Every structure is written in C-alpha cells, then in structure tokens.
Image (tube, grey):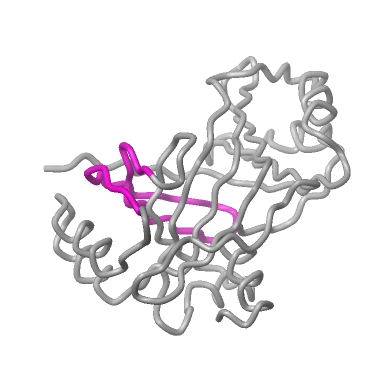
Amino acid sequence: MSKTRNYKRYERKFIVELMDFYQVEAIIKCHPAAFRTIHHPRFINNIYFDTPNFNYYYDNHFGKADRVKVRIRWYGDSLREAQNPFLEIKYKKGLVGDKQAFPLPPFTIEPFLEKRALMNHILQAEIPDHIKAWIKNLEPKVANRYRRRYFLTMNKRYRLTVDTSIQYFGVEGRRSTLKKCYSEEAMSILELKYKMADEETAGDITMHLPFRMDKNSKYVNAVDCFNYMGAV
C-alpha cells in the first residue's frame, strides 16, 4: 500500500509587497520567538486539478468555508521533470488545513503535457479506489512554481515559510505546453503553520510580524491570470 500523510494545522498567510527577501528575512530573524532557518531553500512545482466548471476555484475565490485543492507536487529546479511527485489533496475549513499525500512514479511533461497520459499515470498509482474515482472527474488546469524558504521557532511549535519568485503557467488543450503567464517578482507570501493545540499563543507570534495578513491562493491567482487573458 502507498503511504499517506494526514494532519491538521492552522495556516495563516501574510502578503509582503515592495520588500525583497533579505529584508523579510531580517524581520523574521529579529522576532522574539527566535525563528531560525531550517532546510535548504528549494523550488516547489505544482499542477492543479479542478472540475470542468472550476468548482474548486470558485469555492476558494468566494471564500467558502469548506474548500479543497487537488494537485501534483514535486520539489526541484525543473518544472519539466517530476521526480518523487505526490498527488496531494488539501482540505481547508476556515484557517485549519488538512492534507492527504499519495506518492506517484516520476514523469516528464516534455515536449508537452498530455492530459490523458497524466491522468492515466495517476490512476495506475497505488491510490485508494474512491480517490481514483474522484480524480477521474477532474482536469489539470494550471501550474505554478516558486522558491520556498523555511523557518522554525526555538520551541519548534511554529513554522514559517516564505515563498518568492512565483511563476504561473497555463495548461491548455489536449496536448499543451506549459504557457507562462506571469511572475510575481515583487511579492512574497509568508505562511505561519502550527498545530491546533498552539492556537492560544499564536497571537504572540503574529503581533510581531509587521505584514498584512490576508487570504491568498496561488491556484486562484493562476486561474485569474489566465482568465484575464481569455484562457478560461
């Protein structure tokens, strides 16, 4: 059987504009909770799936309390070569997130992304049948990639990620190259993540982060980008 990961945690997002990463990092490292760097920075690549009518997009766009995202995610410098990818199903209820992750075999999307082949690749993996039946009704819609850096408080209860160099790509047609739409070079997205048991003291962390707390979905941003271009 394939391995899955399940957990629940709070996820609070902050939008940072007109400030480069080194300025953001300096603020984080001056935080009284003593954030320190963990892991090496790495690129995250995603292909997002939705219903033919973009139901998941609209649920996120209009702030529905119960939301879901379905994506293939892998880490690495290449958007074209997916090594150690996972099918991830992410559930959100308000600010609380939960996630299932199913490992997939490696695949490539050069010279184009064949949607049917990608779907068959998922359906042949070791994934529960009820998940496969659900995925059959979805379609790959957009892709993105970004560089992520990781920080952890000294007490190891609060993790902060910083995403920069965000790029959005369209997935169009049966045989489609990934068409680049837009790059967010002047924006960073911070996400504070912590277990539900630590919600009571989370205010001590957020009060020392001088950034704008706001909802932000990279999937919604990507779809909005291509909708503006007449692609959706």
Query: In the shown orientation, is residue 116 left or right of residue 205?
Result: left
Give the residue furthest to the front: 111
Q: Main secondary structure of the magenta part?
A: strand
Q: Which residue is drawn at 60% across and 27% down?
A: 150
Q: What stretch is highlighted in magenta?
A: 81-109
Residue 124 position in % (x across, y down): 13, 56
Query: In the shown orientation, is residue 75 left or right of residue 96?
Result: left
Q: Which residue is drawn at 69% across and 58% down?
A: 215
Residue 183 highlighted magenta (yes or no)? no
Residue 146 position in % (x across, y down): 59, 43
Residue 111 position in % (x across, y down): 37, 56
Q: Residue at x 62, y 52 (%)?
A: 167
Is 201 or 33 nearer to us in this picture? 33
Is 17 or 206 nearer to us in this picture? 17
The image quarter containing residue 41 is top right
Query: In the shown orientation, is residue 67 left or right of residue 30?
Result: left
Vertical comparison of 179 with 51: above or below = above
Q: Residue at x 43, y 55 (%)?
A: 90
Question: If the image is split into quadrants, where does the N terminus sit?
Answer: top left
Question: If the image is split into quadrants, where does the C terminus sit?
Answer: bottom right
Residue 77 position in % (x across, y down): 49, 35
The image quarter containing residue 76 is top left
Q: How many marks can you see?
A: 0
Vertical comparison of 68 with 18: above or below = below
Vertical comparison of 46 with 40: above or below = below
Is 29 or 6 nearer to us in this picture? 29
